[in-house]
Amino acid sequence: MALSGTFPHGFEFALFLYHLYSDGGIPVSRIPLLAAVAGSMVTRTTSSIAFQKYGRSVVTQDMLSEIGKAFINTFEDKSSGQHAL
Amino acid sequence: MLLPINFDPFMTHDRNYCSSSIDKVKPELLSILSRLHVLVIGPGLGREPYMQTFAKIALSLAREKGMFIVLDADALFIVGQDPSVIQGYRRAVVTPNIVEFKRLSEQVGVDPNTPIDKRAEAVSRKLGGVTVLQKGSKDIIATDSTGEQASLEASRLGGADQEFEEAKEVVEVDVPGGLKRCGGQGDLLSGAVGTFLAWGKCYEDGTFGYVSSWI
């Protein structure tokens, strides 16, 4: 994808796409909602990855190292290194 | 939120200490806030009166500056006691868990007969467009800035098109999570939401190179 090098994060790319396809950009009133949805998705995925790895003995500290992976799973396509959105 | 400000915890027994130190804390907070994109208040805050007072000051300063704010844990206690600290400010997200959500909805005066899946929206409406992230087996995220309490001026959006800025939306997130909920996982969530809000702030400021006036 031609633009993929321009955007360091999938989420910013998602914002950009959203911006292109929405009339007049994203209203500021909706930014908290979008951020909350993204935050929720990443946190839940983090928790799931950590549970698969550590099972019942998982503690929150174990989750910290999985955040990056969860972010990639949620917003980026692992196989091609490009953005999933 | 951790206050990297020197003060003597033993002095906090002194009632006058709190009021006299407010003047000292304000400029310190202002200089910190001016360097931040976003403010997360709550995790590890505690309920001691002096911490709650300082958190309220930070909150009001952030509101004046039009920053995005996340309120979690003990900051929700402040909102429950006095919803006006955040009312009408739609640049904020509250992240209550099941117990906190129940308490919050009672405190802001949501009708107890409201169906469970409509409650988050009702709380958001009562808070004037503050986004509510209700944690649970499914996360419900709701925002409703069409109510009476909503205010463009209070959200530092004076001059914006009211119709364009009105949002009424509910999103359910059922991405599978882990089968165990650990203490502190909520801090992870509020931090993640804060990070995304910071990027949202960059978007608003045009840092990514595209601003609303482009299209």
Image (cartoon, grey):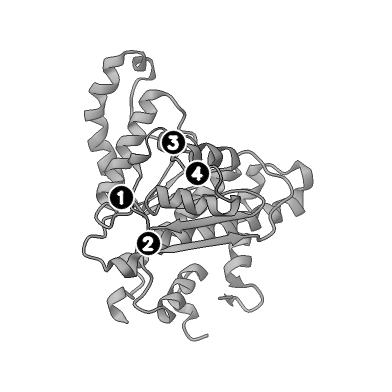
Q: Which tag, 1 or 3, sits closer to the chain's start?
A: 1
Amino acid of disc 1 = Arg
Horizontal side of B35 relative to A2 (left or right) equals left
Residue B111 numbered tag: 4
Residue A44 drawn above or below residue B105: below
- In front: label 2 or label 1: 2
The residue wearing badge 3 is B80
Residue B45 numbered tag: none
Which of these two is toward me, A28 or A73? Answer: A28
Amino acid of disc 2 = Ser
Q: Which residue is most to the front?
A: B113
Q: Which tag, 4 or 3, sits closer to the chain's start?
A: 3
Dot 4: few (<14), some (14–19), or many (≥20) neighbours within 10 Å? few
Horizontal side of B17 relative to B49 (left or right) equals left
Residue A29 numbered tag: 2
Splitting the image into 4 quarters, where does residue B199 fall?
Answer: bottom left
Residue under the image location 45 percent in, 40 percent down: B109
Instruction: Give the distance between the C-alpha atoms of the residues marked 1 and 4, in whole angstroms.
Output: 41 Å
Give coordinates of residue B57: x percent, y percent.
Answer: 30, 36
Q: Are marks 2 and 1 on the same chain?
A: no
Residue B209 drawn above or below residue B118: below
Which of these two is toward me, A49 or B113? Answer: B113
Give coordinates of residue A40: x percent, y percent.
Answer: 57, 56
